[in-house]
Image (tube, coloured by chain):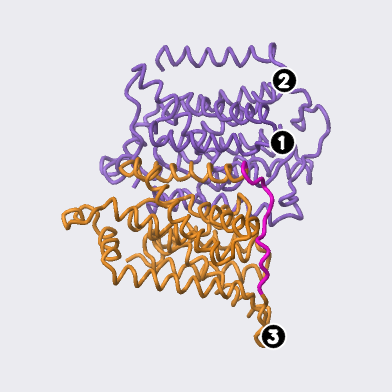
């Protein structure tokens, strides 16, 4: 890690730690959401940066959000147990989809569309099981007030701390993969799978590993998000809409840099909230309209994202990795 | 055999006609330009809004409203190509997918901004036919018929006209075609226009059966991609057959369980088949 990156990370962390002492309660809510989504976007970019574009992260997030909530409401299982179960289930789901995909070299468009189908399967299953999940009406987590056992805190400051910690976990995971031997291997795979295999890289294992980590972290993010919001809706935690939101915010921020997805989260959520506050609910689609235009422009003019672009200007470190050409 | 099951099977066949039309447009664009328009179903949504406003708000006669919608969507298809696709034509395929994904976000939110999230219906009620003791919706029958005719017309167009031949040639080898004196950009534009027009035509058929709202694309979009991939992206006949397989799964699955579970079966079938035949059902 270069000094500049350490400085950027330390600076951002310091700002996040100082925030609760200065900002009103409404902004705390916004910042918590920014951190949680930043974590999920970072988790996605662990795969996305190597050209494995998954449209299925809505599925992992949905599993993460619903499993602990259902276990708590119906069986009184503490989220401390429920969350690991959800993360494990998500990892299993990642293997069930990932293993055959990687084995049979389902890549590029095909991988994106298979994972898209996965996120629809989870969404529609949640809707179909309406006796248990409440279907499209959503699902409210049973409240017990302030409780560590139930992982429920009416005061924002607790979730702020939790969000900050898991965001840092996401950044650390990114660091580990960025610095591990795996990164070289994965970059080689994203350039040319057969060539990578020919120099002795275990393509299947490398891809599967990063997919499992990415899916597990996304489930963790979904679980904490669910615990924080306390109300789950299939449309808002799973399905194609959430998957696309994850993909685009991460790409907008920049998937080739450590803080890119975080910047993407800060940018998109601030934009949404800002427009909502300024224009009121009459302009309910305004934020996403601007967002959509920005995305198209971004992909045309700076596929490396906001942070990637800045790095390019400053000649910060090594040249940004080229967008991986997936077949 | 159970009458309701017969009805489900017939409805499945009828649904397949519309899906086939949608898959055809998407497949044509993929086969020729090599880009997946992930916002394709949302272009259909735009067409449905055009019809709704022309017919229900301004009193334009329905056939004229249909015609205008088809022409408008053809123009829109060209616009999409010029503004969004051509700048990323040489980027990684996944970036092209994402650029049209941005368009999807834009169209859905812009429609929400302009029209709100209300469900709107053009208010045309077509009769229900009774054949024996089985009820068949007339609007579905029309949709099926038009879908089939559209497919046949497109087929003849591709086989018999100069531009059609050029389009097929470009789909086979895009590098050599320039040497044959064919203007690639013009063919791309024509293809985008046809793709848009097919979306407009589908919009006419869907407007007769469904309410229009900004997120209707999410209902059809994923199913159409699935069909195209199952049939083999770019393989029009494959897509045509896959439409009927998927529509039967949805329809019969819906009969035995719920609509959502039927879609879960369809998506599950798709995922499993991708593992058995990763390049589509009919890949050689």
Residue at the left extreme?
B179
In this figure, which residue is indicated by the disc labeled 2? Answer: A157
**How many angstroms separate mark 2 from mark 1 (CA)?**
19 Å
Q: What stretch is highlighted in magenta?
A: B113-126
To which residue does mark 3 refer? B133
| x and y, in percent, of residue B198 in the image | 45, 62
User: The residue marked by circle 1 belongs to what chain?
Assistant: A
A290 to the left or right of A157: left
Whether labels 2 and 3 belong to a single chain: the reply is no
Q: Which residue is pictured at 36% across the width and 43% down the height?
A: A203
Q: Mark 2 lies on which chain?
A: A
> Who's orange, chain-wise?
B
In percent of width and height, residue A91 lies at: 55, 43
Mark 3 element type: loop
Numbered circles on residues, count = 3
Instruction: Say which quarter of the image contains residue A141.
Output: top right
């Amino acid at each position: 890690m270069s000094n500049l990156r350490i400085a950027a990370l330390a600076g951002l962390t310091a700002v996040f730690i100082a925030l609760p002492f200065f900002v009103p309660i409404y902004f705390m809510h916004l910042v918590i959401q920014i951190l949680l989504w930043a974590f999920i976007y970072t988790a996605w970019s662990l795969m996305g940066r190597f050209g494995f574009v998954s449209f299925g992260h809505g599925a992992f997030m949905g599993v993460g959000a619903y499993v602990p909530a259902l276990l708590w409401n119906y069986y009184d299982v503490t989220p401390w147990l429920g969350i690991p179960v959800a993360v494990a289930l998500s990892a299993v789901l990642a293997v069930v989809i990932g293993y055959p995909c990687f084995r049979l070299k389902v890549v590029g468009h095909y991988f994106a569309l298979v994972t898209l189908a996965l996120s629809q399967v989870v969404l529609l299953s949640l809707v179909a099981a309406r006796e248990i999940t409440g279907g499209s009406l959503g699902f409210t987590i049973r409240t017990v007030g302030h409780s560590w056992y139930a992982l429920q805190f009416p005061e924002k400051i607790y979730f702020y701390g939790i969000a900050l910690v898991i965001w840092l976990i996401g950044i650390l995971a990114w660091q580990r993969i960025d610095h591990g031997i795996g990164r070289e291997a994965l970059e080689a795979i994203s350039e040319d799978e057969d060539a990578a295999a020919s120099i002795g890289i275990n393509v299947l294992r490398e891809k599967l590993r990063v997919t499992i980590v990415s899916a597990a972290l996304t489930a963790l993010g979904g679980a904490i998000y669910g615990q924080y919001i306390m109300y789950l809706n299939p449309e808002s935690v799973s399905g194609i809409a959430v998957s696309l939101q994850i993909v685009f915010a991460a790409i907008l921020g920049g998937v080739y840099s450590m803080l890119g997805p975080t910047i993407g989260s800060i940018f998109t959520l601030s934009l949404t909230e800002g427009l909502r506050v300024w224009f009121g609910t009459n302009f309910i689609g305004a934020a996403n309209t601007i967002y959509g235009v920005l995305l198209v422009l971004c992909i045309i003019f700076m596929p490396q994202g906001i942070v990637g672009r800045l790095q390019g200007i400053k000649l910060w470190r090594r040249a940004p990795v080229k967008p991986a050409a997936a077949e | 055999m159970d009458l309701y099951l017969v009805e489900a099977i017939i409805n499945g066949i009828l649904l397949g006609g519309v899906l086939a039309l949608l898959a055809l447009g998407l497949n044509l664009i993929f086969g020729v330009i090599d880009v997946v328009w992930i916002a394709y179903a949302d272009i259909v949504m735009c067409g449905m809004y055009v019809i709704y406003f022309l017919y229900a708000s301004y009193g334009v006669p329905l056939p004229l409203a249909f015609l205008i919608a088809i022409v408008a969507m053809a123009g829109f298809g060209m616009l999409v190509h010029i503004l969004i696709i051509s700048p990323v034509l040489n980027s990684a395929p996944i970036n092209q997918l994402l650029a049209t994904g941005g368009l999807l976000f834009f169209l859905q939110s812009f429609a929400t901004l302009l029209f709100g999230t209300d469900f709107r219906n053009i208010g045309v009620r077509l009769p229900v036919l009774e054949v024996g003791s089985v009820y068949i919706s007339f609007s579905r029958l029309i949709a099926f018929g038009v879908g089939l005719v559209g497919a046949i017309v497109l087929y003849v167009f591709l086989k018999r006209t100069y531009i059609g031949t050029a389009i097929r040639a470009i789909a086979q080898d895009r590098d050599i075609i320039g040497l044959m004196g064919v203007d690639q950009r013009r063919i791309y534009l024509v293809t985008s226009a046809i793709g848009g027009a097919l979306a407009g035509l589908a919009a006419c058929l869907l407007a007769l059966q469904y309410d229009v709202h900004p997120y209707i694309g999410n209902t059809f979009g994923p199913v159409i991609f699935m069909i195209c991939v199952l049939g083999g992206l770019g393989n029009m006949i494959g897509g045509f057959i896959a439409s009927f397989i998927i529509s039967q799964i949805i329809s019969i699955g819906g009969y035995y369980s719920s609509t959502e579970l039927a879609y879960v079966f369809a998506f599950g079938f798709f995922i499993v088949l991708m593992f058995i035949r990763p390049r589509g059902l009919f890949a050689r």
